[in-house]
Image (spheres, coloured by chain):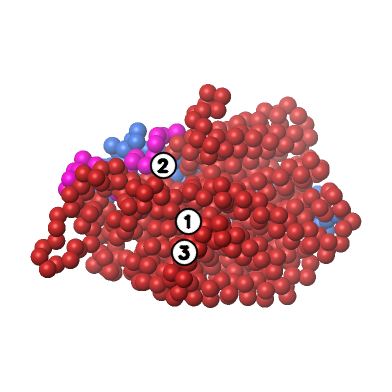
Chain colours: A blue, B red
Amino acid sequence: MSTPNEGQPLAAADGADADAIKRKRGTAIKLLLAFCAMYFTAAMIATPTFAHIAGIEILGMPLAIYTGLLVFVVGIVVTRLCLAQDKGS
Amino acid sequence: MDNPIAFTILAISLAAVIYISWWGRRFTSSTKDFYVAGGKISPRLNGWAMFGDYCSAASFLGVAGAIALAGVDSWWVAIGFFGAWIFVLVALAGPLKSSGKFTVGDVLIGRFGGRSLKFLAMFTTVVIGTLYLVPQIVGAGHLFELLLGWDYMVTVVVSAVVMGLMVILGGMMGTTYNQAVQGIILLVAMLLLFVMAAALYFGGNPLSIVAHAMDTVPPTEAAKVIGQVVVPPPAEGAAHGPFVLAEAVRQGFADLPNALTPGVAVPDIWNQLSLVLGLLLGVAGLPHILIRFYTVKDATDAKKGAQITILGLAVFYIAVLFVGFATMMILYDELIQMLAAGERGRATNMAIPLLGMELGGEVVLGIIAAGAMAAMLSTAVGLLISMTTSLSHDVYAGVLRPQSSDRERLVFAKLGAVVLTVIALAASVWLKDQNVAILVAMCFGIAASTFAPVLILSVWWKGLTKEGVITGLVVGLVVSLVFTFARFGGVPEVFGIRVLGNPALYGVPVALLSIVVVSLLTRTTGNAREFMALAHRDS
């Protein structure tokens, strides 16, 4: 029976020490928090409870459309930051 | 036959798909080739394959159709489908690739070991995969029904046979090329609809689509008052122009919401929260998506592929909003008629092919049908591959017959594909009238309540224990399944708790809480230090 990553000694994995993992975890949490803040704010605005805010018209379109589009923009920025961080490390 | 030209285009694309699967056989000489194409796929090809794998019937047919019926609120399903990838990219893609080999179960086994986890991982994979397979078959069945005028029962059987055949023939290499080609077809088909609709009906100005939408009552609302609507007769000698019924509804009922009014199709804040939570975490628990990260060389390639997918999805889902609004206005009369006839599921799922027919006759209908079929096939095949890999690798080779040969495992995997297709086929008959986007969103809710919290904590939390994983998987699966079937059965409450449209709002916190509490009370953290080092090594 084969095991995951057979042939790679686990203990000697060329890798990440505790500090590096902590740093990666910190970055991942920050990026996810930034995205989730945008995502959930936009989602909650689009409910009947906050429909009066979502319906505010800006340049002929309701705010809900802008916040929805902004989720895509923030998502792409987070994607770029995530890959840039990988290159940096 | 109702639409011979459209059917010919669809048949050619299907033949191409089956040829690619057959061609892929030459690269499938071992189980590793069958499961993950030997890990030799390039990030760019994998990115497009993930796009094709992910854009299922729900994305191509369900979301745009739902926007066409109910307006902007339905776009949230698409935004959630997109957001899920950001979560996967940041939290899971790299560590998953670095610490696993063939299946998501590998990650758990790599850290904790043990037969019970293998069984549990396989069982969860099969439950999620089979439920996810249902909307693909339902969508394909409706599509063939529309194109050929065949009975739904016949069409779902044909669709399921093609899906099973693709997996049995090709393995992961053929599947990857198919998914990548199908991903490109999907994107092109959606953009074609967007450009044609804007050019033919809105003066070539996409913003005009939005402007018209702001003056249009969504068909779901209009259908309630359609009996009281008076359509003015056309001027003498002139034909009715486009949007006549939509304008008449608006003139007769100025107080009704428009297609951009938020909060119309969202019942309340709790349903919305449950939906977006399930969607955000769902991909992190979908085995057919996660398995694609094992088809590339390393964690960096896994992330590069995910970036291509994310960019493609952003373009696709923004186009879906415009296409959904355009469909609403162009097919206003037909959609209201279908709603009045009680055919809401058909109206939602078939709005996009009908738009293709309206915009470019049978030729465009054929292209759209090929795109829709591509969406369903690529996703269905991805699901079958991930399920059979889990059955064969985790259970057959891992527990039942560890000494089995590569060939025996391959045969077991292919037999599994047949059995699972038959089960999904039966469920597709039962759930014939459901909106495919809603069915998929519910699978996201189950995945978000099971694999997602377990996998994320496995690669980020040293304190996680084996008992915590098992408890979390069982509790998450039970809670999410209970609320899922309660919803299908029309049960309003379970133990006094209200049933929401998506099970995630209950499943995710309960699973997370049980994982954390049980982990704090137990000590079997597995080889946490070594596993973490492996999962987070720089590739």
Q: Residue at x 25, y 64 (%)?
A: B202
Chain name for mark 1: B
Q: Secondary structure at mark 2?
A: helix
Q: Secondary structure at mark 1?
A: helix
Q: CA distance from mark 3 to mark 1?
A: 24 Å
In the picture of the structure, the residue carrying the numbered disc 3 is: B149
Q: Secondary structure at mark 3?
A: loop
| Residue A44 place in picture, x, y as percent | 40, 38
Few, some or many residues within 10 Å of mark 3 (<14, 14–19, 20+): some
In the picture of the structure, the residue carrying the numbered disc 2 is: A43
What residue type is disc 1 on?
A: Ser
| Residue B350 place in picture, x, y as percent | 43, 58
For the residues tagged 3 and 1, is the chain the same? yes
Q: Total number of numbered labels?
A: 3
Chain name for mark 3: B
Q: CA distance from mark 1 to mark 2?
A: 18 Å
In the picture of the structure, the residue carrying the numbered disc 1 is: B59
Prevailing secondary structure class for the magenta stretch in the rendered image? loop
Above or below, comparing residue B351 to residue B166 in the picture: above
For the residues tagged 2 and 3, is the chain the same? no
* Mark 3 or 1: the one toward you: 3
Residue B456 occupies quadrant: top right
- Dot 3 or dot 1, earlier in sequence: 1
Q: Mark yes or no: residue A9 visible.
A: no
Few, some or many residues within 10 Å of mark 1 (<14, 14–19, 20+): many
Magenta-highlighted residues? B250-270
Above or below, comparing residue A46 to residue B310 in the picture: above
> Of B105 and B219, which appears nearest the observer?
B219
